[in-house]
Amino acid sequence: MGDNAFSRFVWELTEPPLDVIRHYIPIVGGLDFSPIVLFIVLGILERMCYRILFIFM
């Protein structure tokens, strides 16, 4: 983690959801797959939100 305010903000924003994912998906061979899983989950949530919005329009 860096010493500036922006890097601290990004760390505090991303670390809690990544930590939850790491609880269920361990680091394998030194590779952390939690960011990939988080991107997939966020993509699914985004699509769900768009579908809900378009249903009610």
Image (cartoon, rainbow, N blue to C red):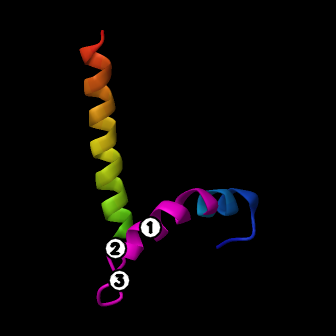
Circle 3 SS class: loop
- Residue 46 point in image, percent of width and height: 33, 37
Please tell me which residue is depicted at 33% across the width and 30% down the height of the picture.
Answer: 49
| Residue type marked 2 | Tyr
| Residue type marked 3 | Ile
Circle 1 SS class: helix
Residue farthest to the right, as pictured: 4
| Residue type marked 1 | Val
Please tell me which residue is depicted at 29% across the width and 24% down the height of the picture.
Answer: 52
Asked if labels 2 and 1 touch by Cβ distance under 8 angstroms, the answer is yes
Find disc 1 in the rendering and name its residue.
20
- Vertical relation: 54 (above or below) 15: above
Start-end of magenta stretch: 12-32
Q: Which mark is residue 27?
A: 3
- Vertical relation: 8 (above or below) 26: above
Please tell me which residue lies in front, 25 or 43. Answer: 25
CA gap, disc 3 and disc 2: 10 Å
- Residue 57 point in image, percent of width and height: 30, 9
